[in-house]
């Protein structure tokens, strides 16, 4: 399956296809849920790819690779090693916009839940806020759950439980058992 998200993204959808062929999963009932990079993968799975997932949940995920790259470079102090590694991970800077779910929100083909810690310093809350705005502007179904006082790792037990309850409830609503 082709994707603007790159090989790591197509590996996920190819894995789902292999599990479906083996009779392990029903491909018509797949949702994608992930945190951090997995949150990016969840968003990319319904914006940069189509027809694969019934819903997506992104927890502290990256929605805008350009913004993430700028913020990460600023915090790294322009470290040559970090900048090189970021370039290898994200590809040429010109590709970042087309590989960013935020800029393909109008292509979202499934409901999206965005869950994000307000105090996340690794992937700032702004990522989910901007994705929510893009989905809203595109008229796509989404929910935004803000976890007040929470960091990237969901270090607080009560907010970790809130995240799990929200994600499970969302998946159950958009992918019911019957």
Image: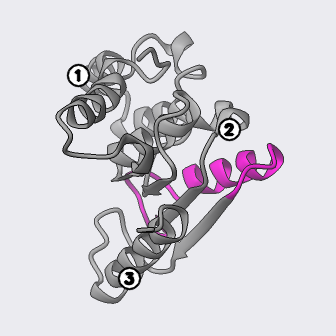
Badge 3 density bin: few <14, some 14–19, many ≥20, Cα 10 Å? some
Q: Earlier in the sequence, mark 1 or mark 3?
A: 1
Q: Is residue 121 left or right of residue 125?
A: left
Q: How is the image coloured?
A: one colour
Give the secondary structure at mark 1: helix
Of the 4 image quadrants, the one containing the C terminus is bottom left
Q: Circle 3 is placed at which residue position?
A: 159
Q: CA distance from mark 2 to mark 1?
A: 32 Å
Q: Circle 2 is placed at which residue position?
A: 105
Quarter of image, res 73: top left
Depth check: 115 or 3 in front?
A: 3
Residue at the location (73% across, 45% down)?
Answer: 134
Residue at the location (41% across, 82% down)?
Answer: 162
Q: Which mark is residue 103?
A: none
Q: Is residue 130 left or right of residue 16?
A: right
Depth check: 78 or 145 in front?
A: 145
The part of the chain drawn in magenta is 116-141
Q: CA distance from mark 1 to mark 3?
A: 34 Å
Answer whether labels 1 and 3 touch (C-beta < 8 Å). no
In magenta stretch: residue 110: no
Depth check: 38 or 74 in front?
A: 38
From the viewer's perspective, is the residue at label 3 or at label 2 nearer? 2
Give the secondary structure at mark 2: helix
From the viewer's perspective, is residue 34 above or below residue 92? below
From the viewer's perspective, is the residue at label 1 or at label 3 nearer? 3
Q: Position of residue 12 (x, y in %)?
A: 30, 32
Q: Earlier in the sequence, mark 3 or mark 2?
A: 2
Q: Is residue 14 left or right of residue 97?
A: left
Q: Which mark is residue 81?
A: 1
Badge 1 density bin: few <14, some 14–19, many ≥20, Cα 10 Å? few
């Amino acid at each position: 399956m082709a994707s603007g998200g790159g090989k790591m993204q197509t590996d996920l959808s190819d894995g789902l296809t292999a599990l479906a062929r083996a009779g392990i999963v029903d491909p018509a009932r797949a949702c994608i849920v992930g945190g951090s990079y997995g949150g990016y993968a969840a968003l990319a799975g319904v914006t940069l790819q189509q027809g694969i997932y019934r819903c997506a949940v992104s927890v502290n995920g990256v929605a805008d690779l350009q913004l993430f790259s700028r913020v990460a470079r600023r915090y790294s102090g322009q470290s040559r090693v970090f900048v090189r590694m970021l370039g290898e991970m994200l590809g040429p800077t010109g590709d970042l916009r087309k590989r960013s779910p935020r800029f393909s929100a109008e292509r979202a083909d499934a409901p999206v839940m965005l869950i994000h810690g307000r105090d996340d310093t690794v992937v700032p809350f702004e990522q989910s806020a901007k994705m929510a705005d893009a989905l809203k502007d595109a008229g796509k179904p989404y929910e935004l759950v803000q976890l007040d006082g929470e960091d990237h790792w969901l270090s607080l037990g009560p907010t970790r439980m809130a995240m799990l309850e929200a994600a499970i409830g969302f998946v159950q609503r958009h992918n019911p058992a019957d």
